[in-house]
Image (spheres, coloured by chain):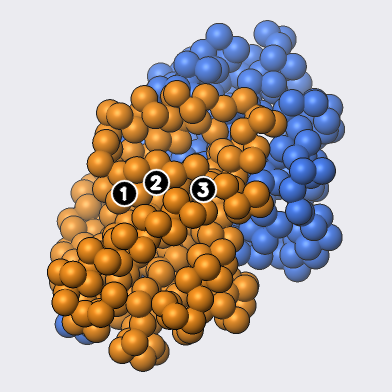
Chain colours: A orange, B blue
Amino acid sequence: MPDGGRGSATVKINVVQSVLQANDAVAAENRRRLSEAGVLALNLMSAPGSGKTALLEKTLTALGPGQPAAVLTGDLQTTRDAERLGGLAAQVTQINTGTGCHLTATQVAEGLRTFSLPGLAYLFIENVGNMVCPAAFDLGEHLRVVLLSVPEGDDKVAKYPTLFQPADVILLTKVDLLGVLDYEMGRVRADLARINTRAPLIELSMRSGQGLSRWLDWLRERRREFCSVARTPA
Amino acid sequence: MPDGGRGSATVKINVVQSVLQANDAVAAENRRRLSEAGVLALNLMSAPGSGKTALLEKTLTALGPGQPAAVLTGDLQTTRDAERLGGLAAQVTQINTGTGCHLTATQVAEGLRTFSLPGLAYLFIENVGNMVCPAAFDLGEHLRVVLLSVPEGDDKVAKYPTLFQPADVILLTKVDLLGVLDYEMGRVRADLARINTRAPLIELSMRSGQGLSRWLDWLRERRREFCSVARTPA
């Protein structure tokens, strides 16, 4: 009977690989479409409740109508995130994944069909709150934004390296709780030094506004780089 | 190309169903072994960093050597949780899942082989921190314990119903942060009233100790029920 379990697990791995290959082809096509339209796409990943939607609320407000953004937001159920962002983004589409633990490139392709891409500066893809599964699925984004929140504890980089390894920027959220909770920033930095020295770590508080301008500077700089490569207007 | 993606998704669903069936058979055998040995098994599930290991630290200390417990702790990498619990539990085994987003019944069966079950009162299975995948996999536990922490926000029950629906008890952790964060308890209770009215909601703080005696009372009561059914000594 344990053999039965192992046999099935082997089959599962093969199929997941084929799903991943199909996913990667769709992701490459998504990225091509987005690049062609001059839309910089960011995939936001984190545990549930680390503040992806709150970050988007602040970011969309700061960018304003001069830098129009679309949002694709993935959730098992409910349209709460889309409702929160509805008035702030130029275009918002919610993808309900049912029991799916991550967004797929095909779901993003379907979401892109609901948007009018020309004129958009950014696409923010808010993935399902999960530190494991989203990391394995390329959605066609240009950049990966990984959030971790102070109340989750200072051991999460070491525990979920597949999420943090490919990140282009790491946002430590809810830093206003640093004074209230036991949290060793040195532990986080030491773990990051072993797996990802490329991505900057930005400390953020949506309540105090700390770090928000550094995040927005990073974002606008990536947009400038993207436009100079794509030769679309910044 | 989007058709290719959809075709693969269909194949994936069939295979996941067969994996689930194989898993359920192994889970049933795990449960039979645990019941026969008089060991009450609890499956602890939550998002990353909601306090499963901290809860186990307090619980094992409170139970003491008179109610010996084993712990199976699942994580992608690192043995940090096992190290934290090593001195407190009678027996601890760590299962590293690599990129696996949940424990499986087969992994638990392998973990059980590392334990001497006779004489144990409890088995605590600390699942991978994830609000989606663990919910679909029966491990052979008798009871499901679901944690959600205040800093994750008051919308998580509505967003992750598959986790909360089959819970036997729901632990709201880090309630010491209720005064610091915006959190509507009414929203949590209203969402629970729609999907799970059977499980008690216990408010906990590992820092202040609030709610710990209520949790321990619930746990000991379940053990008494279990022993009266299994006719093993309480």
Question: Quick check: B64 left or right of B7?
Answer: right
Quote the CA–CA distance across marks 2 and 1: 7 Å
Q: Quadrant of residue A178?
A: top right
Mark 2 vs 1: CB contact within 8 A: yes
Q: Is residue B120 above or below residue B46?
A: above
Q: Earlier in the sequence, mark 2 or mark 3?
A: 2
Callout 2: SS: strand
Where does label 1 land, which residue? A167
Callout 3: SS: loop
**The residue under label 2 is which amino acid type?**
Ile
Label disc, if present, on residue A211 of the rendered structure: 3
Seen from the viewer's position, the closer of residues A200 and B40 is A200
Where does label 2 land, which residue? A170
Disc 2 packing (10 Å; few <14; some 14–19; many ≥20): many
**The residue under label 1 is which amino acid type?**
Ala
**The residue under label 3 is which amino acid type?**
Gly
Q: Quadrant where the C terminus of chain B lies?
A: top right
Mark 2 vs 3: CB contact within 8 A: no
Quote the CA–CA distance across marks 1 and 3: 18 Å
Which residue is pictured at 47% across the width and 16% down the height?
B83
